[in-house]
Structures are given as C-alpha cells and as structure tokens.
Amino acid sequence: MTDETTYLDRILAAKRAALASSRHEHANWTDAQLQAELSGLGPCRDFAAALRQQTRPRIIAEFKRASPSLGPIREDAEVVTTTSGYQSAGAVAVSVLADVHFGGTMDDVRRAAAALSVPVLCKDFVLERRQILDARRAGAAAVLLIVAALPAPQLRPLVEFAHAIGMQVLCEAHDAHEVDRALASGARIIGGNARDLRTFAVDLQRAVVLRRSVPKGFLYVAESGVNGPEDVQRLVDAGVDAILVGSALMSSEDPGATLAEWIGAVR
C-alpha cells in the first residue's frame, strides 16, 4: 500500500461515498426540529466524569469485530455480552465501533448504550453533523473526531455541534501539530493515538510523548498499542488520564476476564 492509498484514505473515501448515497430524514433539520428531537432523548452520561474517577487504571474498553490491518478479530462477537463483561471487569467507559471496516454498526452502539450504565463512546469516521446526531440518538455519550480526517474549517464546528447537543468529544491526534489543532478546536478530551492511521503501524511511545503536549485542565486518553498489563502500567506511570484498549482484549478468549486480570495487575 502506497502513501497515496493509505488505510485512512480508503476508509474516508468509503465513508464519503456512503454519506453521499444515503438519504437522511434530518439532513437539513431546522433548529426547532433539532431541539424537539433532543428533548425526547434525555441527558447523556458524563464521559468526562468517568475519566476523572479515582480508580486507576481508567480503561475505555473497546468492542470491534475486525480491523483493516488485522482483518477479522472476532466476527461473531455479541455486543451486549462483550461490553457487559467489560463493565463488570471495571471499565469506566466502553468504546463501540460503528464503522463497517471494523465490523461495526450504529445498532451496536445503540444496544450497548441501552444495556450499560457506563458511558459509551461512538467510534466512527465522522465527517458530518448528521453522524454525530445519529450517535446521540443511539445513546452514545461521546463521539470520536479524528484531526487527521478533518480540516480546521470542519473540525471546530463539529466539536461545537457535539457539545451543543449534550455530547462530549474525544479528539484524536497523532502528532504534536494535531494536538495543537485538537486543543484549538475547543475539544476538552484529547486522544493520543499510538497507531498511525495512514499505515496502521503502532508505536506506544507516541502516546507517551504526546501526553506532554496536552496541558493540565484537559483530559488525555492514550489510544491503541496496548497488549498487556505492562503496557497499561507504562501509560499509567506516564500520567495518562485513561487508556483505550481494543484489539488485544477482543483477541483474547474472554475479553472481560482479560480486562479484569489487567486491571488487577496494575499498581
């Protein structure tokens, strides 16, 4: 795969095509229609508060059936069973993939949010406001926005829209420049991804280094590259506020039990 056909490029191209071809009943909603719909949804759970709990490590455990780099991980995984296991193991929040490249759908987000008491992060490749509204309808407390996928004129309005409808944003960065862009967008929760979304290569040190670029007063989430309790301990020692873990848990025989072991092993 060349630089011109990176994983991120291919996923974003597919997402744009899907958005362009789909008809959406609220693609051009009025403010009054939006407020009427939101009034029937109830408040979101507090994702940021979950990441500030006294318990450590604070784990955001992720549900996904596949990934573009690994291929199928656990194609028959059931979202409620798996995410309930995460919650029982001590996850402070759960991340659910809603993108087809990861074997996910918005219905997975909806079912997890209905079954759990912890906040649910909807992970998708968000390009438009309607995707954020769909996540809100599904019961998600927070949505992922990826700096590398969104030019500045798009990023800040999407952050502001998510906040305006009661959601929180995990704004994902891969280098110091992207951290600056995330901070400037108005996001209050910054994710430092150890995975390069263009090549899907992983370097956990990237998440450690990016922690230093995020000022106090913002929450920092280390994403990707965690394969065991030693990696969790390394990130805790680096001062991260929370750790998002997905593939290693989903690849294990019992994701919930594996998470419980990891949490128990960390000082």
Image (cartoon, rainbow, N blue to C red):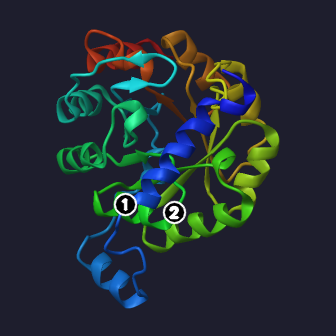
Residue at the location (46% across, 46% down)? 124
Which of the 4 quarters of the picture holds residue 65? top left
Q: Is residue 9 above or below residue 262?
A: below
Identity, as a three-letter code, of the amino acid under mark 1: Ser
Which residue in the rendered view is the most extreme toward the right? 177
Residue at the location (65% across, 61% down)? 155
Task: Residue 64: give x, y in percent of width and height.
Answer: 36, 29
Q: Is residue 204 above or below residue 145?
A: above
Residue at the location (32% across, 68% down)? 43
Say which residue label 2 marks.
128
Say which residue label 1 marks.
22
Rendered-image quadrant of the N terminus: top right
The earlier-in-sequence mark between 2 and 1 is 1
Name the secondary structure under disc 1.
Answer: loop
Name the secondary structure under disc 2.
Answer: loop
Which residue in the rendered view is the most extreme toward the bottom? 32
Which of the 4 quarters of the picture holds residue 198? top right
Identity, as a three-letter code, of the amino acid under mark 2: Glu
Which of the 4 quarters of the picture holds residue 235? top right
User: In the image shown, does 59 or 254 lie closer to the viewer?
Assistant: 254
Task: Residue 56: give x, y in percent of width and height.
Answer: 47, 30
Query: How far apart, in angstroms, are the residues tagged by discs 2 and 1?
Result: 13 Å
Residue 209 is at least partly visible in this image: yes
Specify few, some or many for label 2: CA neighbours under 10 Å numbering under 14, 14-19, or 20 or more.
some
Is 107 situated left or right of 95 in this image? left
Residue 95 is at least partly visible in this image: no
Task: Residue 86: give x, y in percent of width and height.
Answer: 29, 29
Is 133 situated left or right of 231 in this image? left
